[in-house]
Image (tube, rainbow, N blue to C red):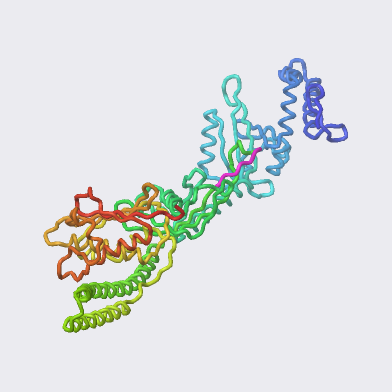
Amino acid sequence: MSEVTNGRPRSDGDASGQPPTAVRVEALRAALAKALENASSDDDFVNEIAAAQAFPSRIWLFLEAVEQAPIAISITDPQARILYANPAFEGVTGYAPNEVLGLNESILSYKTTPRSVYETLWKSLHEKKTWNGTLVNRRKDGSRYIAELTITPILDARGETAYCLGMHRDVTALHALKQKVQNQKALIESVIDVAPIAIALLDDQQQVVLENHEYKKLTDDLGVTEPALQVLAELRNTIGLAFEPPKLGGRNFVDEEICVHPASGKAVRWFSCSGSWFEQQDAKADSFFDPQARAYLMLLIKDITAAKRQRELERIGAIRATMAEAELVQSLRETLSGAVYQLRGPLNMIRAAANMLDRRGTQIDTAMLKNALKEALTAGEAALGTFEASMPEAPQEATAPVNLNDILRDVLMLLTERLLAAGITVAWQPTSRLSHFHGRANMLRSMFKEIVENAIEAMNERGRNVRELKVRTEERDGRIVAVIEDTGPGISQELRHKVYEPFFTTKRPLSHSVGMGLAIAQDVVTRHEGTIDIDPDYTGGCRFIIGFSPSGS
């Protein structure tokens, strides 16, 4: 540690107790004193020497500070001839201070510095302005370094440049580090840009700070300013994922599939999304002594629409095959049920006649008639039993959590061809987030398919210009509700309960309908502890409202 003696700092150094820089200052003072002793009384320089000897202590303190400064400092005349250089000058340039006195600063110049830089430098000095800039300089040994330089003109009493003060430091290592970071950033960005999936980096305020070309394409494809925000919203609605870093309860996720409905009526898009959180130290000045980490989310968005559609086609094909088999069984059951129903009428009449004969007496002719009727009754009941025994069993299906949106979407996909052939416009309006309920998926698909097919037939009449089917889902009053509206002729008030009766139909005679569709639909809804109603206030056609209780209620 240094002491201050007579207004000047003292430090441990040579045998005299002074550091090299202090020795130089003392030597300067001694030289001034000697010059004063040897000067003649009429010498004009005497006054200057005397003034220098009389410098206040703070001036000598300033001189020692410059001598010991870790930054290279030099003083030149207006033509850049070096008049003074401090010891740190040697550490940067390799030139000792006594080696450069009287030489021009151009000894440090190197050819790779553009001439325009020097022109700007001299222009600023001629205008008596400070110049800051960077040069490529050459050391005494010929090696090059990057110098960060500040040159300030020192003006005399007349306002003219008397000296120039130059301060510069070697920033070669800093430049190399900065260039390395920039190169790594450019490499990362180039790798990200050629990636076949959309990539976005978001900060903890949901602001996108880095993106690639595929992500930018999504802004046009989806018609939104920030696709990442829409993706995060869908993830929140689909899997309940909150936008929070792990320390606040958030989590990373991998290959979460979401469905996005683009603006302007574009086709539905499917994406597989992965997200990884990481932290980065805050570079603000406030965080220098109190390091603060900032969280970022790397979001990967892979378009799987084509693969999803292919899987959907395969899945719908499998559902179609399963439902075709179930419908075949159901059709056979309906046919046999119709036959059984028709047979029961005559048999009941025969049974009633036999009972009447029993009550009237036991005459011989009556007995013969009674026996004949009983034989007919026995034969009829045997035939009826044969019909009932030949009916195939209804397919058994286990219950599982069901999403009503998925069920209705499948039904609409199954009936797409019929809807297009009939010229029917479909307005599909699913609510973004819908609770699940326990049910039998295939049974529900068949039920909704029957309702939609009835709507198609109702609207597919000659002369009916408006053909629109609206299907929407919602949650109201703690119930999961599906609403299906058509623009057909509707169902009159007196028939709104009768349509659920077996074998009742309002369809044309050649429609091959036995009138079991809505009866079966009501049975399916009842098995799922739901409700099915025809809205009496809807006058634009027919509106079915089907409701179910969510799981756990």
Expressed as whole percent of the image width and height from the top left, the position of residue 471 reads 29, 55
Foreground residue among 353 and 207: 353
Quadrant of residue 459 within the rendered picture = bottom left
Quadrant position of residue 424? bottom left
Vertical relation: 351 (above or below) 80: below
Left or right: where 539 falls relative to 431: left
Tell me if I can see residue 431 in this picture: yes
Q: Residue at x 49, y 43 (%)?
A: 205
- In the rendered image, residue 203, in percent from the top left (x then y), is placed at 51, 46
The image quarter in which residue 408 lies: bottom left
Query: Looking at the picture, does residue 288 appear above or below residue 402?
Result: above
Please give the name of the residue rendered at 72% of the width and 19% of the height, measured from the top-left corner. 48
Q: Is residue 418 magenta?
A: no
Can residue 427 be seen in the rendering of this structure?
A: no
- Residue drawn at x 54%, y 39% as measured from the top left: 118
In the image, 368 versus 552, the foreground residue is 368
Residue 292 within the segment the image draws in magenta: yes
Residue extending farthest left:
463
Give the residues in magenta.
289-295
User: Residue at 27% of width from left, 61% of height from top?
Assistant: 451
| Residue 206 spot, x, y in % from top left | 48, 45
Q: Position of residue 440 (x, y in %)?
A: 39, 64
